[in-house]
Amino acid sequence: MDHLPGQPSFSPQPSPQRSKIANGSATLLGGKDERSVYVRRMKEVIAEHAEDRGGPDAMSAAEKSMVRRVAVLTIELEKLETRFAEDPTVTDKTVDQYSRMAGNLGRLLERLGLKRKEKAPRTIEGHLAAKRKTKPEPAAA
């Protein structure tokens, strides 16, 4: 429902009864800095996979949970790949760990489905409504 001009729009506040992760105001539990490289990369990976699944609103709780695990495994594998490139003395144990993590990531991705879900095409009315929402209100004189 559209709001009337001059009337404040209602946007629901995050519930204090839910965790910051459930409210969408945090990526990790605890005091982790949400601006860290790790958290920024995690948000990127989560957003990419959520987009492939039709967006967060189209995902079930189980899919969201699996996407978070996919993000963590992806980041940890990327860290190991950087280590392989920089450290010529990587042990067999590290290679084994990498291999097991890659296998687990592959299984999670198979469970999620590797095919991208297309979003419903946006109508012109939806586009114009979104533009109106992002347009700043003129200042009152």
Image: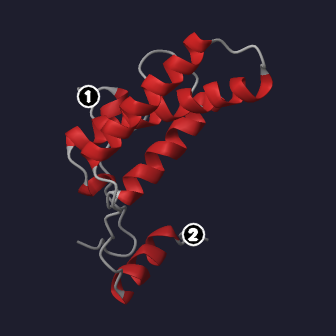
Please name the amino acid that badge 1 sits on. Arg
Is 87 situated left or right of 130 in this image?
right
Q: Percent position (x, y) of residue 32?
A: 54, 19
Q: Where is residue 43 in the image (x, y as percent from the top left)?
A: 51, 41
Q: Label 1 crowding class (10 Å Cα cut-off): few <14, some 14-19, many 20+?
A: few
Residue 16 vertical position relative to residue 92 in the rendered view, above or below = below
Rendered residue at 29%/48% (across/down): 12
Q: Earlier in the sequence, mark 1 or mark 2?
A: 1
Q: Name the residue under label 1.
A: 18
Dot 2 alpha-carbon crowd within 10 angstroms: few under 14, some 14 to 19, many 20 or more: few
Q: Is mark 1 on a helix, strand or loop?
A: loop
Residue at 44% from the left image edge and 44% from the top image edge: 46
Q: Can residue 14 be seen in this view?
A: no
User: Foreground residue, 97 or 1?
Assistant: 97
**The quadrant where residue 86 appears:** top right
User: Which residue is located at x 61 percent, y 71 percent?
Assistant: 141
* Image location (x, y in percent) of residue 51: 40, 58
- What quarter of the picture does the N terminus occupy? bottom left
Where in the figure is residue 16, as x and y percent of width and height?
28, 27
| 96 displayed left or right of 13 | right
Label 2: which residue?
Answer: 140
